[in-house]
Amino acid sequence: MNSVDLVPSFTFDNFVVGTGNRLSVAAAKRVAESPGSSYNPLFIYGGSGLGKTHLVTSIGHQAGLDHPALKVVYDTLERFMDRAMEAIEAGDRDAFRARFQDVGLLILDDVQFLAGKRRTQEELIRVWDAMSARGGQVVLTSDRPPQEIDGLDDRLLSRFSGGLIVDIGAPDLETRVAIVRRKAEEQAQELADGVAELLARSTFSNVRELQGALNRVLAIQELEERVVGTDEAGRLVGVGPEPKGESEFGDFVADVSLAMDTVVSRSAEDQQLAGAVMRWEADGYRTSRLEALLHGSHGPSEVEEAVRAFEADVDRLREIDAQIRSVDPGAPELHWGVLRDPDRIGDAEAMLAAVRQRRQPLPAPPSEYQFARVELDDGSLALRAARAAAEQPGSRYNPLYVHGHASPVRSALLGALGNRIAERNPDRPVAFMSGKAFADELIQALERNQVEEWRARFRGAGALLLEDVDILADTERAQEELFHLFDALLRSGAQLAFTGTVPPAQIAGLEDRLRSRLAAGLVVGLEDRAGGGAEEAEGPGGDAAAAPAEPPPPQREPAASLSSGADGAGGHEDAFFLARDKVVWRWPYVAQWLTEGDR
């Protein structure tokens, strides 16, 4: 289908979140994560230029990344209507509807133009019903809520109301400032102090007009290769040196100017307060604390202390801003209004702690843990499986579960696996920790209200290696978090490996949904060997499968790999691990056990 292309820059990362759009953004992200199952349809309405198209385009981009097999179509209602009319006039409605038969996510922009278009509405109903029958997701935007669209078919109105209808409001001052700064950064330009705040305070009916004003400033800077100051920026966007009655900023300046002009009726303390308010307002900080003093009685010492305390809080906000940038230069918190409000120092401190928690390095395995030092002979299934998993992390023996009573050996094996993965994939961190440490970290995150940051640390891991997972038995929240983390990491291609004293099936107090996932990979005991027939290796589901009775393998180098050519040694195929009826006969991830010949 020749649908309108998705604008590359319209992504969630480039969308500034504020109080006016927080709910719509949260709903959009949920739809992108699980299209067809959350808020279907999603109907976003709001005035022109407030970011509706940017937001729904972000859904298309994110859904396409998270679900590569999903076919995403974005269209304006006008284009949809034109195609429908062409098909109707040509007497070929079936061909038009067939265009949508494999679409998993349909995004229609500006559906207010459905008003009075009966035939287009009929075609949309048909397409919609066909998509709904196969679990497709529909996302729509409009400049008004469904009930205010004149001449809308009751069937469409009921369908719109069956999902989530959410409005997107005008951005507040802080959000407008963040938008201006973000747009300037996208064009690799810096603004002079106070310019972003001046533009944000100017009277514009929507974000497009605000961006147009910014473009005029940036054009001057780019063409003349100089920085535009606040006075010139004000003239460029129509905010002259004289206060404008219709401008919030102009009204404020007029009020303060009046106070300064009538100095005979104002005290020196009021003048000091007014000057401080004007200074910090120009720098983009909230000054409600100082403004409140202008309306009361106060002595010189009180004013001095108030101004000094305010300036100290501003300095601390700047320190927090710098510390956040040093920890995470791309932190979204940098664009939040908290860092511009001296009355929210506590929130800013908590935000800094949250960023540090999120960016705290994952615990890596000790460097001394190496395969050559693991006290297991080469015939050990656990050792050979760990070597194979290290060669193809995330795709072979995932998850790997090793059990046995020799705790130091289990730790050494798991650590060696982690170090080998880290060597091969240095861009993705490896998390190596005990089940107790996992639970303790979660408790600390709960105490600090930083659970989301704690989760984010682990979701970026290339491998999660958890020792003594049976310690989590009978816990509730720790098992729940591990369950969700397990699935998220598996989808991202990360390697999962666990150890315990007993197989998953024997861990009392372990939730069935977690037990089944631990047992779905390769479960192997430390005592298991590839030959001899007397020992057992547990396959998917925790079932024991007798090891094949075959002659001992020929002598070879200790580092020989299970797969052909791995590590450049041996070139031997391990018949035991390739025997699906022995090990992977119920493996749920088909693509992970197909051999090259099967493909």
Image (cartoon, rainbow, N blue to C red):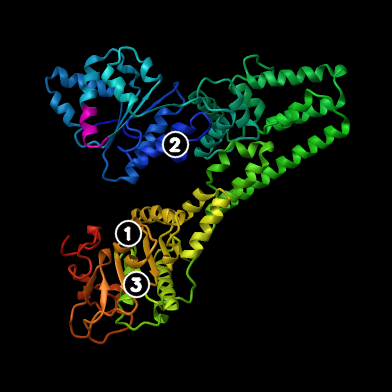
Tell me the amino acid under the disc marked 2: Ala
| Residue annotated with mark 1 | 517
Label 1 vs label 2: CA separation?
29 Å
The answer to whether residue 298 shows anywhere in this view is: yes
Label 3 vs label 2: CA separation?
40 Å
Q: Which x, y percent locates residue 155? A: 26, 20
| Label 2 CA crowd tier, 10 Å (few <14, some 14–19, many 20+) | few
Q: Main secondary structure of the magenta part?
A: helix
Please tell me whether residue 569 belongs to the stretch shown in magenta: no
Q: Quadrant of residue 234?
A: top right
Tell me the amino acid under the disc marked 3: Ala
Q: Residue at x 44, y 55 (%)?
A: 476
Q: Residue at x 45, y 58 (%)?
A: 475
Comes first in the chain, label 1 or label 2: 2
Q: Is residue 299 above or below residue 512?
A: above
- In the image, is 212 to the left or to the right of 64? right
| Label 1 CA crowd tier, 10 Å (few <14, some 14–19, many 20+) | some
Tell me the amino acid under the disc marked 1: Arg
Residue 568 — which label?
Answer: none
- At mark 1, the secondary structure is helix
Q: Which x, y percent locates residue 123? A: 21, 22
Q: Which residues are magenta?
A: 127-136
Check whether the beta carbons of the residues at disc 3 and disc 1 lie within 8 A of each other.
no
| Residue annotated with mark 2 | 26
Comes first in the chain, label 3 or label 1: 3
Q: Which x, y percent locates residue 294? A: 78, 24
| Residue annotated with mark 3 | 386
Q: Residue furthest left?
A: 91
The answer to whether residue 388 shows anywhere in this view is: no
Q: Quadrant of residue 88?
A: top left
